[in-house]
């Protein structure tokens, strides 16, 4: 199994935090990020979460580490090489 690197983990945590925040906004009309960091710095946090989402999309679709974890692609390639 392929291990996630620091960038994968950082993006993963940011995406979870962003998703939970949007859940709070949708269900309770409460923006936790803005409540903690303020309106000005909250915008920076949202931009960083957006970059994490772009990285997550890239990683899942272009064969990054997250994609290999999800599909087992790298492990399958190694098994094919061993069998040959």
Image (cartoon, grey):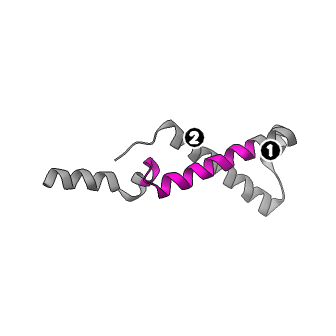
Q: Position of residue 9 (x, y in %)?
A: 53, 42
Does 14 sit left or right of 40 as displayed? left
- In the displayed structure, would residue 38 be above or below residue 62? above
Query: Nearest the camera: 48 or 32?
Result: 48
Q: Quadrant of the C terminus?
A: bottom left
Q: Is residue 16 magenta?
A: no
Residue beneath the point at 61% across and 52% down: 54
As drawn, the residue found furthest toward the right would be 39
Residue drawn 86% across the image and 43% down it: 39
Q: Which residue is nearer to you in this view: 19 or 67?
A: 67
Extent of the magenta region: 45-67
- Would you say 20 lies left or right of 2 here? right
Dot 2 falls on a residue whose secondary structure is helix
Q: Position of residue 3 (x, y in %)?
A: 40, 42
In this rendering, would 30 be left or right of 3?
A: right
Pointer 1 or 2: first along the chain: 2
x, y percent for residue 22 = 74, 57
The residue drawn where x is 74% and y is 42% is: 45
Disc 1 crowd rating (10 Å Cα; few below 14, some 14-19, many 20+) is: some
The residue singled out by tag 1 in the image is 43
Placement of 27 over or under 68, stated as above or below: below
Whether residues under marks 1 and 2 lie with C-beta atoms below 8 angstroms apart, the answer is no
Disc 2 designates what residue?
10
Other-residue count near label 2 (Cα within 10 Å), few / some / many at <14 / 14–19 / ≥20: few
Q: What secondary structure prevails in the magenta region?
A: helix
Whether the magenta-drawn stretch holds residue 58 is answered as: yes
Q: Position of residue 28 (x, y in %)?
A: 82, 60
| Residues at marks 1 and 2, CA–CA distance in whole angstroms | 18 Å
Give the SS element for disc 1: helix
């Amino acid at each position: 199994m392929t291990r996630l690197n620091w960038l994968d983990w950082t993006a993963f945590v940011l995406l979870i935090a962003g998703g939970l925040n949007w859940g709070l906004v949708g269900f309770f009309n409460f923006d936790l990020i803005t409540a903690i960091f303020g309106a000005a710095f909250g915008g920076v946090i949202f931009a960083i979460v957006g970059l994490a989402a772009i990285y997550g999309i890239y990683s899942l679709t272009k064969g990054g580490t997250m994609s290999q974890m999800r599909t087992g692609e790298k492990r399958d390639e190694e098994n094919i090489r061993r069998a040959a």
